[in-house]
Image (tube, grey):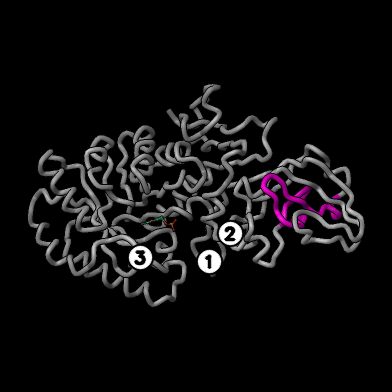
Amino acid sequence: MTVQERKLKPQETENSSAAAPGLTGGPPLTETGGVLTIDLEAIAANWRALADHVEPAECAAVVKADAYGCGLREVAAALAATGCETFFVAHLHEARIVREIAPDATIYVLNGIPPDGAPQFAAVRARPVIGSMPELLEWDAFCSVNNWTGGAALHFDTGMNRLGVPVDEAPALSSRMKMPKHGISLLMSHLACADAPDHPLNTRQVQIFRELRMMFRGVPASLANSSGIFLGPATHCEIVRPGAALYGINPTPAEANPMRQVVNLKGRIVQVRQVPRGGSVGYSATWTATHETRVAIVSVGYGDGHLRAGAALSGEQPVAIIAGKRCPVIGRISMDLLALDVSGVPEKSVRRGDFATLLGDGIEVDELARFGDLIGYEVLTSLGRRHHRVWKPLAKQG
Ligand SMILES: *Cc1c(COP(=O)(O)O)cnc(C)c1O
């Protein structure tokens, strides 16, 4: 069954994460403050572009955090239908969802095994990414007692000091490679500064990882996240692990964004009002009209994950698009509302019930993030759970 063939049952529309992959989710269109559209074809196109770029290496997909807010079921189904065979998630409960969608996929769980958690991994046929010696001992014990050969990644810390076995353990561990059932299906590490190509830590991590690969010959290796892919073929190894770039975040922040935009957010205009000269808008009266101003009140706010307090810090005003015109957000963003200066838009083009574009149609996710003093990852992972959601299906193949 392809994504576009899946039909949504009525009870499944409430919450995408509890439902089969669908075409819509969240509250109905008539009751929603915002409409979030996720373009699955754009995600698929981004994956294909990265897969072509890294050939002959394999391109996996990182779908943790509800596929960066884009809907785990829908995104996993679209990517599996596009040819993606390996998925990375953060937690086992995310792996379970991917397993339902993609019965044959290889699934790695980045955050590893919690104490006594090994049996659950086997039940889902998920592979833990082992990042410490206690985890490795526990996993080995489980595998030998149960004869489990489901595989695991061995994550070495090459300089990030977050997860990963210290590299000085590598020589001792590499001796297990002589055993036929060593159980390690992937050698892994993670780059700390891949989005800054000139950062010296990149070269150091690549070099350490190269030495590790020589100790673990024959085991497929994975180093690159989205930005890492663009550091060049030295990082590609056998498998790359892009997340952000799939969802339209620029993996090369110093250059033009090579990825397609995926997410579009529109907010409903609740009312349009005239604010007289000298009148202020919003909490704490941070914005004051220097001349009479037409203002549209839009029913999206920080309670929907929209920018929140950072908007005030960045010193730049975010914008929305109405009838092709960029309109600045004015005053503080409230929990459920924000205000736009729509003086530049013809009156007939901005009415109660119309929609203003807050993300997409030329407002890139990274641009919105900058306005909020955030990164694109934060914008996507905090996309409102209470928006009406529409998944634009994959393009018909052939
Ligand atoms: C999240 C994550 C990725 C994906 O990173 P992006 O920058 O989103 O491409 C890859 N590897 C690990 C270990 C991660 O935690």
Mark 1 and mark 2: Cα distance apart in space: 9 Å
* SS state under label 3: helix
Mark 1 and mark 3: Cα distance apart in space: 19 Å
Give the mark count. 3
At a point 21% along the width and 50% down the height, the residue shown is: 185
Q: Position of residue 300 (x, y in %)?
A: 68, 45
Q: How many neighbours does mark 2 have within 10 angstroms: few (below 14), some (14-19), or many (20 or more)?
A: many
The label on residue 233 is: 3
Magenta span = 319-345
Q: Position of residue 63 (x, y in %)?
A: 42, 46
Residue 360 visible (yes or no): no
* SS state under label 1: loop
At a point 53% along the width and 37% down the height, the residue shown is: 395
Q: Which residue is mark 1?
A: 253
Q: How many neighbours does mark 1 have within 10 angstroms: few (below 14), some (14-19), or many (20 or more)?
A: few
Q: How many neighbours does mark 3 have within 10 angstroms: few (below 14), some (14-19), or many (20 or more)?
A: some
Three-letter amino acid code at the position of disc 1: Pro
Q: Judge: label 3 CB < 8 Å from ligand 1.
A: no
Three-letter amino acid code at the position of disc 2: Asp
| Circle 1/circle 3 CB separation < 8 Å | no
Q: Quadrant of residue 311?
A: bottom right
Q: Which residue is mark 2?
A: 366
On screen, residue 383 versus residue 123, left or right, reads: right
Viewer-closest of 352 and 283: 283
Viewer-closest of 75 and 268: 268
Q: Residue furthest left?
A: 179
| Quadrant of the image where one finds ligand 1 | bottom left
The quadrant of the image that shows the N terminus is top left
* SS state under label 2: helix
